[in-house]
Amino acid sequence: MAVITSVPRGDVTATLNYYTAPADGSQPYNLVGDDHPSDLPRRNYGDDFHDVVIHDIRGREADFTLDRDAFQLVQNVPPSAERDFVDDESIKKNYYPEVEQLLLQQIPGADKIYIFDHTIRRSSPDAPRSPVLRVHIDQTAASVEKRVRRYFPDEADDLLRNKRYRIVNVWRTLNKNPVEANPLAVASTSTLEDKDVIPISHRYSDGYIGETAAINYNPGQKWYYASGMTGDERLLIECFDSESLKPGSKIGGRVPHTAFKDPRTREDAEGRESIEVRALVFGN
């Protein structure tokens, strides 16, 4: 029996969850993993909810680019050799090479890709990871440099000095039908101000400390989504671009993003499933 879908289309006003600083003035953090002291809260900062207009890019997908907006939609991607997306090793074997080739094709000057992890999100109550309903950026300049040094200890100085380096997430839906519930929204980097970006210490249970970013609400931010995304589309989400560090650069290189609850979504809509693959991209 065919599944009935009613994909919400067009611009929409939805509530997004932004950042509120810790009440005690301490450094904001997230805890990752299950081996932290039980008396520590998983995060020490709060929520700040605002209604924002999210613009549907359907019909003008090609208007948005990594250099200007820090996101880009790729369409008509061939079917993946990975069919099930349930086994990590199978995903690494079958899907990672496809992501690598996609990035090399889509990012001018890219000549070296290093995929360092992936996350699968499902909307079922027992899923390990679900869609994130909080505005954030996955990396900061400091955490990206740390990753380069972690994965390329012998080459790091040369890569950081002589290469353009970025972190780009490749997001796709795993639903067989177009996405209805919890679509993904992104804010163009061209509308993001430095004061809106708040570094968050990301503390892993194995002792590794990374850094992500939370986002302050700013009415000047312009938000977008692609309604009804399908399995032959990939959303490139740029978390950092070293070009942004150059004096006078007009490259922002970082895109706030979040899942959001579209108020037009049917109550019995199919839950969203997705995979995001994270990669270091080196080039000119």
Image (cartoon, grey):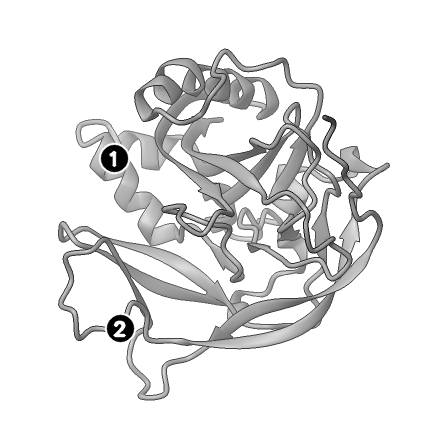
Residue beneath the point at 45% across and 19% down: 95
Q: Decide if residue 114 is in sight here.
A: yes
Residue beneath the point at 48% across and 43% down: 122
Q: Earlier in the sequence, mark 1 or mark 2?
A: 2
Considering every residue shown, the one lying at the far front of the view is 1
Local crowd at mark 2 within 10 Å, few (<14), some, or many (≥20)?
Answer: few
As rendered, which of 106 and 178 lies closer to the eye?
A: 178
What distance separates the C-alpha of mark 1 from that of mark 2?
A: 37 Å
Say left or right for 86 vs 176.
left
As rendered, which of 29 and 178 lies closer to the eye?
A: 178
As rendered, which of 23 and 104 lies closer to the eye?
A: 23
Q: Position of residue 20 (x, y in %)?
A: 47, 78
- The N terminus: image quadrant: top right
Say left or right for 107 vs 227.
left
Residue 103, above or below 64: above
The residue under label 1 is 157
Q: Which amino acid, mark 1?
A: Asp
Residue beneath the point at 74% across and 27% down: 2
